[in-house]
Amino acid sequence: MFEQQYAMTMLLMMTTMNAFLGILMIFEIIPIEYGMSFAFFVMGGMIWKCKRDLMGNVRLWENAMQYRKRMDTRILRGRFEEEK
């Protein structure tokens, strides 16, 4: 439950920040180029921070060697037949 609340709070913060930057750009307080660049980098930072806080230092992908090793282990243990 905490993870969902944390992710939802991060999404609300991103939305609020983007709305605020949009207002600043509409009223020409800051140039559009600066506002869009700032929003892009800040959202990337927020996504990175959220991922690190919720998942730790886990990679979101695996290389081909790790994939083959994982699949070979599953085949040797007979897990393919159990999942079907």
Image (spheres, helix red, strand yellow):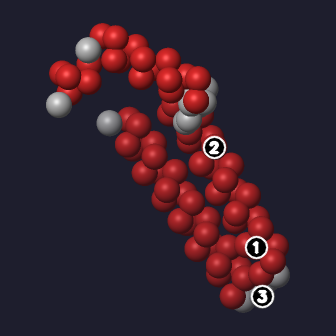
Check disc 3 and give the amino acid type: Glu
Dot 3 lies on which element? loop
- Residue visible at 50% across and 33% down in the picture: 54
The residue at which mark 3 appears reads as 28
Location of the C terminus by quadrant is top left
Residue 26 appears in view: yes
Real-space CA distance between mark 1 and mark 3, rounded to the nearest whole angstrom: 10 Å
Query: Do the residues under discs 3 and 2 have CB atoms within 8 angstroms?
Result: no
> Tag 2: residue type?
Trp
Disc 1: which residue: 35
Judge depth for marks 1 and 3 and give the one in front.
Answer: 1
- SS for callout 1: helix
Q: Using residue 63 as the reference point, say whether residue 30 is left or right of it.
A: right
Query: Residue 5's spot in the image, x, y percent?
Result: 39, 44
Residue located 76% across and 65% down the image: 38
The picture quadrant where one finds residue 65 is: top right
* In the image, residue 42 above or below residue 32: above
Residue at figure coordinates x 52%, y 51% from the top left: 10
Q: Position of residue 58 (x, y in %)?
A: 56, 27
Residue neighbourhood size for the residue with mark 3, other residues' Cα within 10 Å, grouped as few (<14), some (14–19), many (≥20) = few
Quarter holding residue 1: top left
Q: Indicate whether 80 appears above or below 23.
A: above
Give residue 35's position: percent from left, percent from top.
76, 73
Closer to the camera in the image, 40 or 6 = 40
- Quick check: 37 left or right of 7? right
Residue lying at the far top of the rendered structure: 77
Which residue matches tag 2? 48
From the viewer's perspective, tell me whether residue 39 is left or right of residue 80. right
Choose mark 3 or mark 2, whichever is in front: 2
